[in-house]
Amino acid sequence: MECVFGLVGNGFAIVAADTSAVHSILVHKNNEDKIMALDSHKLIAASGEPGDRVQFTEYVQKNVSLYQFRNGIPLTTAAAANFTRGELATALRKFCKFKNLLSSVLRCHRSYSSGWLKVQFTEYVQKNVSLYQFRNGIPLTTAAAANFTRGELATALRKNPYSVNILMAGYDKEAGASLYYIDYIATLHKVDKGAFGYGSYFSLSTMDRHFRSDMSVEEAIELVDKCILEIRSRLVIAPPNFVIKIVDKDGAREHAWRQSVQDVTTAAV
């Protein structure tokens, strides 16, 4: 039940995210910060599969830093958003090439009753082993064939698209504050307000009612608190804690945590 939302005010952008680390029916922690600073004037708030979320946001962060290191100037928020969108699109297109193989592998792993899927992958391996012998005049050893098979499984497995949705907020001297909406299928939009997750049903409607483009920081924080209150009161399994961060001409910074549950350390018995 992840909730990520943000808005652009008068000279600043603000993003908020829940802080629950959840797997299946278990809550592992309530202080997971899902908003990362890309550089001094950019924030990236993400929701999605925990592994993809952490891996992809760190990947974007390091590449933004690498660009600045190589060129001596930082990426603008628009450029960083377009780079992020491009990486999501690349991963998505690569996945399309391998989706049939991946489907076969995963379904065979989950259900041995899917006979035709097992046949598809084993025939794929057989034909490639034969192709190698035809091209090179010598057969693959058993170890080489096993390593080829393992490599194909690993390649298909790692060609998944990133299951992550992103709100990127930033401040540039020329353009001012901005907010970009980037979803898992590489859709990119510059928006005044946006949200992801089940909380978006309530935060978007609340922002539609109260949002103004000339809002001050104090008014924006009040609106964010209204969204959090609405999520907590209306969502059947609502995350208890949220973190709020702001970016403006003075840089990106953490504003506050809204906590109703504290992490408790249990003594070993």
Image (spheres, rainbow, N blue to C red):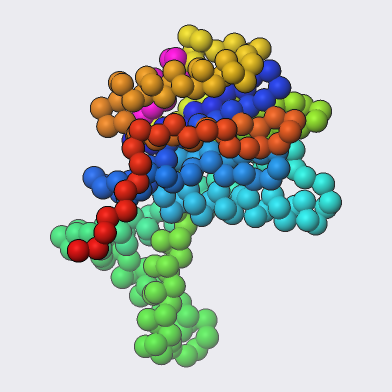
Q: Is residue 254 left or right of residue 233?
A: right
Residue 39 location in percent, x, y?
69, 45
Q: Quadrant of the C terminus?
A: bottom left
Q: Position of residue 10 (x, y in %)?
A: 68, 18
In the displayed structure, does residue 70 sit left or right of residue 125? Answer: right
Compared to residue 269, the image places residue 211 above or below, namely above
Q: Of residues 16 and 182, which is closer to you in this image?
A: 16
Outermost right residue: 72
Residue situated in front as seen by the camera: 86 or 33: 33
Q: In the picture, residue 248 is in which quadrant?
A: top right
Residue 256 position in % (x across, y down)? 52, 33
Residue stretch in magenta: 198-206
The total number of labels drawn is: 0
The overriding secondary structure of the stretch rendered in magenta is: helix
Q: Residue at x 47, y 80 (%)?
A: 132
Horizontal arrangement in the rendering, residue 39 relative to residue 258 (left or right): right
Name the residue located 49 percent from the left edge and 43 percent from the top edge: 34
Res. 205 visible in picture: yes
- Image quarter where the N terminus lies is top left
Residue furthest to the left in view is 113
Report the residue at 66% width, 37% height from top: 252
Nearer to the camera, 136 or 97: 97
Residue 193 in view (yes/no): no
Membership of 132 in magenta stretch: no
Residue 163 x, y percent position in the rendering: 44, 45
Residue in the image at 45% along x and 60% along y = 158
